Image: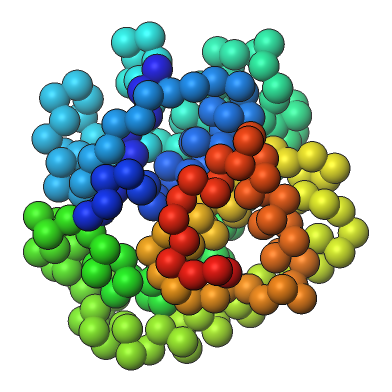
Amino acid sequence: MKLYELVGKDKSQGFSPYVWRSKMALAHKGLEAERAPVIFTEIPKLTEVEARTVPILEDGGEYIVDSWRIACHLEENYPDKPSLFGGEMGRAQANLFQYVAVYTLLLPLFPALVHDIFLGIDDRDRDYFRKSREARLGKSLEEAAEQKHAALGAFQKQLRPYNATLKTQDFFCGAAPAYIDYIIYGLFQWARGVSALQLIGPDDPLFDWRGRMDGLFDGLGRTITPRSDR
């Protein structure tokens, strides 16, 4: 089993929020995958599979592209391992939430991180990243950097229901973590690996939840080198 992971200048550190979902899902299932680091511009050149994004999981000669498809593959092919969804209803709810997370969390956070991401990527990716991300933002990376604290504030407002939920339960899936927790955790790992911005404070319930997530699976989440203590 092999998991293709997005890296920057430091090839030991993967920072994709989607790859982190898959890494946590694999660990949840008690499965191990060989790490295959790639940079942005290497992904379309992979000869084994046609893909433009990671994660990509190779399992027994089959290539699965996309974090959601990987999660469903693991659930369907390893039913004897702990469930990621807790049944069909949980799977449907996780499917909905992956879209909710993109539009209410990932997209608001992206402008706050984009310049820091640019500073950490491989030099071979810089032209591609600047051109594609500036087209997406409608502004330069430098302009985004000047406005990153406003973008961070907009993102933090979106965290209110998540902090409220964690006042009454330890994880978003209840007493124990499952795939919705991994979706949210992937965002925090993304930010932690690329930026020194502090997304949450120690008084936020999310802060303690992230600490619990960090301790899962022999501290898997702590293998990323944070740009900040928070």
Where residue 18 sits: x, y (%)?
44, 46
- Total count of labels: 0
Image position of 147 (left or right of 11): right
Report the quarter where the C terminus lies.
Answer: bottom right
Question: Which of the 4 image quarters holds residue 142?
Answer: bottom left
Identity of the residue drawn at 77% across and 49% down: 171
Identity of the residue drawn at 47% across and 29% down: 70
Above or below, 200 against 127 in this view is below
Image position of 188 (left or right of 193): right
Which residue occupies the foreground of this view, 10 or 71? 10
Which residue occupies the foreground of this view, 207 or 168? 207
Where residue 82 sits: x, y (%)?
70, 22
Identity of the residue drawn at 76% across and 76% down: 203
Which residue occupies the foreground of this view, 206 or 73? 206
Above or below, 102 against 200 in this view is above
Asked if residue 34 can be seen in this view, the reply is yes
Coloring scheme used: rainbow
Image position of 171 (left or right of 151): right
Where residue 25 sits: x, y (%)?
57, 33
Question: Which of the 4 image quarters holds residue 162?
Answer: bottom right
Asked if residue 109 can be seen in this view, the reply is no
Above or below, 201 against 1 in this view is below
Report the quarter where the N terminus lies.
Answer: top left
Where residue 100 sits: x, y (%)?
58, 57
Identity of the residue drawn at 71% across and 64% down: 206
Image position of 6 (left or right of 101): left
